[in-house]
Image (cartoon, rainbow, N blue to C red):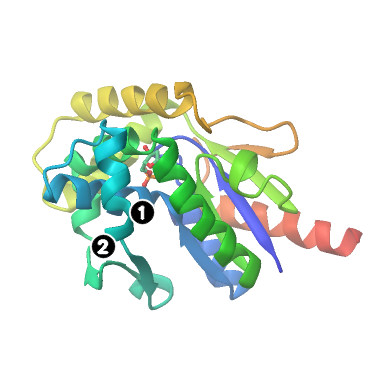
């Protein structure tokens, strides 16, 4: 199996790049952040606090996440409902970051992610893929960019979706989420020593994807 693990902070371009890499290599893309978002959405819809470990633990068996389609038409289903747009709402981002601190949620989703990775050639992006989900993945990358560049990317994405939001608010939220994701006790975002660090501030998604693919091709030739 080919497993390509990509971690990094919010707005680093992980999902755009991971999708491109998967399409170019003809393999599956697994958006692990979308899984945390779907859990957060379910909790929010059911009035369960995303900080309440005991209450969240109780609803986990009711949360079934699946994917359908490939490439641009790939959708995430929450109990059979397409929630691909709903999970991208701004208010879901913070709730996803908060719910992802809970060990029971992480264990529940990580088991599913490992199963998929053991059965499929896959590019996975997230926060703990290189350190925790697949520490032995053959290809590991840490994708980052400056906070300004990441905030601007998110801002444009939200505006394009019709959101009414200020750039400064998006930037403050990104910095807050960085802190939340890298300072949590359980499986925080870290740069592992064996990951290739890529700063995408001045690179297009195509350039980053090509760089990753060249590392993967070199690695495969090297064996
Ligand atoms: O990548 P994203 O913004 O869609 O992820 C949403 C949140 O989920 C993010 O703030 C942290 C959490 N997450 C995580 O803890 N571990 C992952 N592997 C992926 C996402």
Q: To which quarter of the image does residue 142 belong?
A: top right
Q: Is mark 2 within 8 Å of ligand 1?
A: no
Q: Is mark 1 within 8 Å of ligand 1?
A: yes
- The one nearer the camera, 59 or 194, is 59
In percent of width and height, residue 198 lies at 61, 38
Determine the residue positioned at 26% across, 46% down. Answer: 40
Q: Are marks 1 and 2 in contact (CB under 8 Å)?
A: yes
Report the residue marked by disc 1.
Answer: 34
Determine the residue positioned at 58% across, 50% down. Answer: 208
Above or below, 90 against 75 in this view is above
Quadrant where the N terminus sits is bottom right
In percent of width and height, residue 139 lies at 71, 52
Above or below, 83 against 189 in this view is below
Mark 2: few/some/many CA within 10 Å (<14, 14-19, 20+): some
Q: Name the residue furthest left.
A: 164
Q: Is residue 39 left or right of residue 130?
A: left
Above or below, 44 against 67 in this view is above
Report the residue marked by disc 2.
Answer: 84
- The one nearer the camera, 105 or 32, is 105
In what element is the residue under mark 2?
A: loop
């Amino acid at each position: 199996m080919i497993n390509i693990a990509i971690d990094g902070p919010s707005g680093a371009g992980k999902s755009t790049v991971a999708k491109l890499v998967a399409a170019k290599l003809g393999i599956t893309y697994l958006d692990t952040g979308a899984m945390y978002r779907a859990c957060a959405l379910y909790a929010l819809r059911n009035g369960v606090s995303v900080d309440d470990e005991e209450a969240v633990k109780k609803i986990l068996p009711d949360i079934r996440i699946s994917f359908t389609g490939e490439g641009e038409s790939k959708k995430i289903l929450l109990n059979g409902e397409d929630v691909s747009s709903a999970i991208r709402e701004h208010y879901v981002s913070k709730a996803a970051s908060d719910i992802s601190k809970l060990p029971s949620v992480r264990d529940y989703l990580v088991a599913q992610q490992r199963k998929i990775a053991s059965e499929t050639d896959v590019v996975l992006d997230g926060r703990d893929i290189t350190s925790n989900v697949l520490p032995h993945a053959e290809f590991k990358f840490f994708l980052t960019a400056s906070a300004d560049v990441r905030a601007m990317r998110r801002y444009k994405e939200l505006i394009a979706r019709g959101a009414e939001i200020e750039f400064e608010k998006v930037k403050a939220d990104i910095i807050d989420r960085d802190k939340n994701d890298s300072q949590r006790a359980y499986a925080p975002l870290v740069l592992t020593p064996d990951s290739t660090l890529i700063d995408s501030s001045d690179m297009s998604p195509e350039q980053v994807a090509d760089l990753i693919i060249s590392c993967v091709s070199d690695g495969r030739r090297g064996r």
